[in-house]
Image (tube, rainbow, N blue to C red):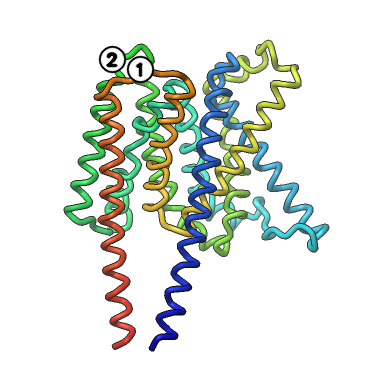
Amino acid sequence: MYQPLQTEKENLLSKYLRILTVVAAYWTISILTVFVNKALLSGLNLDAPLFVTWFQVLVSSSICFVMSSLSKRYPRFVTVPSGNPLDKETFLKVIPLSILFTAMIATNNLCLKYVGVAFYYVGRSLTTVFNVVLTYLLLGQKTSGQAVGCCLLIVAGFWIGVDQESLTDSFSLIGTIFGVLGSLSLSLYSIYTKRTLQHVNQEVWLLSYYNNVYSAIIFIPLMLINGELSVVLNYKNLGEPWFWAVMTVGGFCGFAIGYVTALQIKVTSPLTHNISGTAKACAQTVIATSWYNEAKSLLWWTSNVVVLVGSALYTRVKQLEMDQRHREQMNNQKV
């Protein structure tokens, strides 16, 4: 009787430690990527956000291709799953997710271009709310009344934050809209990632590879439609080595965040990933206000606290529900 319980506790502890490690990596890389992207999008005097994003996925695609080639040539030293993004069947199964991936990173960077890093948290705080709505509409999974109440609290925090930010000179309506669209696309991406992973044998690396390759292609017509080709060609620092160096750093960050995002979804769930992202963004806000020496009103900070409390309560409600389902499953197995 003692031995099985002890083994079960050890397995549970090992699982929690793995999740903690992945979440910590996600937080670190994500916060670093946000600050790097803000510098790229606002500090280079280059009005071509889609080009900056496209270059990031191009770098990520190149990294994946090089690693795949090295794995085939030196399997003893480099081991990554083998896959071909040009395979027709693979393309048809992954391209829907890649479209969502493109929408997610494009709207995220467009939001970040127009709003400050501090407000970026509140601007994209509706991810959990969208996740609840979409989970019901797409998967038919209902949410408890307590969880819905937490979502309403998050919406209230978002509304207060937008209201307070609108009183400042840094407010951007278009940036806020892109933030909402970013939350929506992230929720969709999180849900469909779980579905798409089964088509690539649960290999996060392969999914990242395919998403970046397909996204690099999707971005080309988007850049042309947005008129960014002439902007880039006329950019005064286009031939400077430092420009391509910082762009490459952004590309490496883009690759890293794409990988750890998919990994966090894999080891947790779409819901947990969204909650982790919201909590991470809160810490990011505190760091940003200190880094950029921004002074915010008490009500502005209250909006952040309301969103955080709503997200934390939602996490607790879902955790209790998950524990209840786990106990019921264990009891059924014993019977």
> Which residue lies under the disc numbered 2?
167
Q: Is residue 89 left or right of residue 248?
A: left
User: Quadrant location of residue 310?
Assistant: top left
Q: Is residue 143 left or right of residue 5?
A: left
Within 10 Å of the Cα at label 1, are there few (<14), some (14-19), or many (20+) other Cα atoms?
some
Q: Secondary structure at mark 2?
A: loop
User: Quadrant location of residue 325?
Assistant: bottom left
The quarter of the rendered structure image containing the C terminus is bottom left
The residue shown at (31%, 43%) is 130
Q: How far from the left and from the top, in percent, is residue 48?
A: 56, 20
> Which residue lies under the disc numbered 1?
171
The residue shown at (24%, 44%) is 151
Q: Are marks 2 and 1 in contact (CB under 8 Å)?
A: yes
Cα–Cα span, label 2 and label 1: 7 Å
User: Quadrant location of residue 36?
Assistant: top right
The residue shown at (57%, 33%) is 219
Q: How far from the left and from the top, in percent, is residue 71?
A: 76, 57
Which amino acid, mark 2?
Leu
Which amino acid, mark 1?
Phe
Q: How far from the left and from the top, in percent, is residue 90?
A: 59, 56
The quarter of the rendered structure image containing the N terminus is bottom left
Q: How far from the left and from the top, in percent, is residue 31?
A: 51, 36
Question: Is 214 in front, or is 17?
Answer: 17
| As drawn, 84 above or below 115 | below
Q: Secondary structure at mark 1?
A: loop
Q: Is residue 83 left or right of residue 31?
A: right
The residue shown at (40%, 53%) is 270
Within 10 Å of the Cα at label 2, are there few (<14), some (14-19), or many (20+) other Cα atoms?
few
